[in-house]
Image (spheres, grey):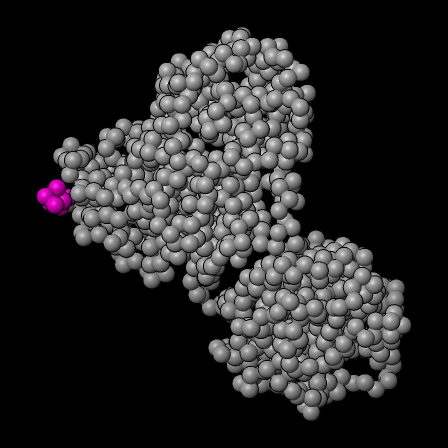
Amino acid sequence: MKICIWCTKIFDLGGTKRVVTLLANELVKEHDVTIMVYQDRFKEDRNMYHMSEDIKVDFIDNNEFVNRHHTPAFCWRYLVQKLNAKYGIFNKEKYNDILADAIFPKKTREKWVKYLNEQNYDIIITTASLSLRLGMLAPELNAKTIGWQHNCYAGYLDVPNVVFWKQECLLQEYLPKLDRYIVLSDYDKRDYKKFLDIDTEVKINPRSFVSERKCDPKSKRFLMATRFVYAKGLDLMMESFEEFCKQDDEWQLDIIGAGDLWNQIVADAKRRGIEDRVNFVGYTNEPEKYYLNSSVFLLPSRWEGWPMVIMEAFEFGLPVIAFHTGAMDLIIDDGKTGYLPEAFDTKKFTDAMLKLAHDEELRREMSRNAIWKSEDFAIEKAVKEWNRLFNRVMGIKTFYMKNEEQILECREKYPLRTSYAEFVKEYQIRDNTILYEAFGGRGMICNPYALFLYLLEKEEYQDYTHIWVLEDFEDNRKQIEKYEQYPNVRFVKYKSKEYCKELATVKYLVNNVSFPSYFLKREGQVLIDTWHGTPLKNMGFDIPGANISQGNTARNLLSADYIVSSGPYMTKTAYKDSYKMQNLYEGTVLEEGFPRNDKLFDSDRAEVIQELKDCGVDVKEDKKIILYAPTWRGEQYSRPDTDLQDVYKLINVMENSIDTNEYQIFVKLHQIVYHYMKENAMEPGDAQTKFIPATMDTNEILSVTDVLISDYSSIFYDFMLTGKPILFYVPDAENFEDYRGLYFGFDKLPGPAVSTPEKLGELLKDLPGVAASCKEKYEKAREQICPRDDGKACKRIAEVLLDGKEPVNPIYLNQTDKVKLLVYAGDFSDTQETEAFYEFLNKVDYEHFDVTLIGNGAKEEESSEKLDSLPKEIRVLYWKRSYPATDEEYVCHKKFMKSKKTEVPEMLLDFYRRELRRMIGMSKFDYALVFTDMKKFFPAMSGALDVKQIFNIENWQNLLKC
């Protein structure tokens, strides 16, 4: 394509000039590019922004287009502009022709149309104020037209006598005549639509440098790179830096740039007595030298669009302090890649400078974050988007163009999984990064929290960055405030795009349940599933309907490099049997005990009591604690049965049965119950101070608990390590055992079990007698359930995970003589396929074959029943179609499935490999058996399977001979 970029200047200081040159340098690799400017030819300096010699520069003499003689018409146009700028007299739709002629006379327009059409451009792009002029020319031009904003909406329309001041009506008429109008942020897109009803498209500016060298966080130098104009806030900078110098006598400030206010700002520095601390560099074509010699970048602008200098600072690893204006919060992650003090509050700006200046570790952490953040602004991504735009306006039908509506619809419908797929495909894994998630981001709790605390405190692991996933930042505010002071600790919101990026790019993944259904462990990532308790009640595939409901958990476990176990009982009950991992799991079971139980050996009682108080719990230091911690009940995990009235009644009976001068009672509900109550606005009311929030770690609470009352919760297994009394309140024992099932009978429990509040009250009256009567069962249960818990589980696991040491108690489940078979039978809707599958079930020898079925079709009642009724010997991995495909892959896949083509499109090959890895984790199979049409989804991707042979409905009986 032949592309023209029309701007006022290019060989001059400024972000617009820099980004135009940067984009042109990339576009010229594929297109014929001309930059058209009003500057004189003698000002050409391609070294300023390293402009490619392949770019043509068209130096325009504006006198050839404009009659500047003081004719009556010229004077009239001058008067119209002045009156409009001052009073907005002509800023009305009915006066648009008058104001348009004053700004860009009709005869001048005609000359421009003739000149531009003679150049035979395919696309003309204008920057800033020229976009309005291009809109006036657009209907007569042969080329497609694109306006390109380089400042925020307010910077163009709300600043007196700047750019589009009092020209709203003109914009409303002429900007829509452009083929596209490009803005820098979603905020600008919103404002143009809200105030002017103009549709725009967002294209963020890319970084202009790629540097293998990074800044030195030890350096005590701030940096500004700016033009000396009012908008850049240099006067605010002098005020803030003066205050900074009163509290610091070491740091220096380098300012690169030039402009009209140079002398004024230099004089201001002298007046404030800080001239020896400020280095006014002026213009330089070697800005990299200053970036590398600094450690913090400052941007006190009054308004900005999408400042290039921030991307440059990030690329060199400089955290940025900028006033919170415009789209700054879309670029700078406050507290992570810099700080965003309140707009124009120089005191807060100074405070941010002091915080970074006096904390080298904080600078280092923010530097790492900034370097990673700079990847979001890679020029390759920007050029890809611009080329897509060019294809659209030119009507060139690429796959994206042909399917843009569907692709964008997919992106909107599946924002997380498509974003996650993009990160998996385009971003590298970052060494020394660990992501922690507990109960879907409920809090910093359970085994992940214990492991985190251990690593955070140990000197040998200080180079690691810890990223915590939290669902609700407000609920976890206390914990965030406690740990955000650490330079190597960060927080991300559960199921946000930032979460997707971290999930796709960290080296180590720590979870106690499962990651979302679109998650797949990339090659090079290390996943450890710590789990969240030793099983008492039935779990995994022992739960009714598990062949459908347990699919995500099962494949997460099969993806894990390591799974933590409390001991042989848990390994057999939970992993070998209930989740049917025997023969198939390729990772290592670590029978090292639970990390969270280390806290029972070393927690500080005073600290935990204070934390309870901080959470709003009315706890007294001089009283013993009785904790009631029931599990969840109900048929659906996400919809537990919750009756607070029963809990209130129980609390009342218990308090009437104890000496309240010696004991106090608190309630810790199950994580999912707490979540359900919150989602449904169920408040504990007057008893609020007796309920411990789910965001507080249970094992920290157990460390200060004197008596535990539970039911079917595995919490009692952990508490056995304390040797303190355990009571079991099970009002629904018979019903619960019938519909859920128990692994550990009531006769083996390390404490008495009762079914009424009154009987529980009787037990509370004689706690010493209760403890004595259950001592033998208590010790036997402790020996059976938690033989490895000695307070050093975190140490052993960390050494395996991060140091590469051999596990002390490893268990490997993949050792088998059985033939491992992966089967797909579709959704049972096809009679012939279903009959063949059931014939296979009748003939297969389960002593010889280990069979895994990819389940499908749960939405149909008949298919669901078939899945539920399969033989217990079959392991079902239910296939939830929340696959991690990019938006283009998703659309391409749908089209391929509907087409008559049989060869898999190249675009889908990598996606199908990823999807297989998501479905089966690290599992390995000897053979595959596919009963359905080879054109359906799973058969189409099965070509990526690493097996000896794939059998089908025609030859499956030969498989039985293998």
Q: Is residue 832 magenta?
A: no
Q: Quadrant of residue 121?
A: bottom right
What range of the chain is rendered magenta? 955-962
Q: Is residue 762 above or below residue 529?
A: above
> Residue 162's x, y, as percent?
79, 69
| Residue under the point 83% across and 74% down | 275
| Residue under the point 53% across and 50% down | 458
Q: Which residue of the protein is positioned furthest toward the bottom in this rendering?
A: 42
Of the pair 373 and 796, the residue shown nearer to us: 796
Q: Is residue 348 above or below residue 8?
A: above
Q: Quadrant of residue 815?
A: top left
| Residue under the point 47% across and 11% down | 755
| Residue under the point 23% across and 33% down | 873
> Residue 184's x, y, as percent?
64, 63
Q: Is residue 364 above or below residue 770?
A: below
Of the pair 763 and 831, the residue shown nearer to us: 763
Q: Is residue 510 above or below residue 545?
A: below
- Residue 953 in the figure: left or right of residue 590: left
> Residue 590's x, y, as percent?
37, 42
Q: Is residue 960 magenta?
A: yes
- Residue 876 in the figure: left or right of residue 649: left
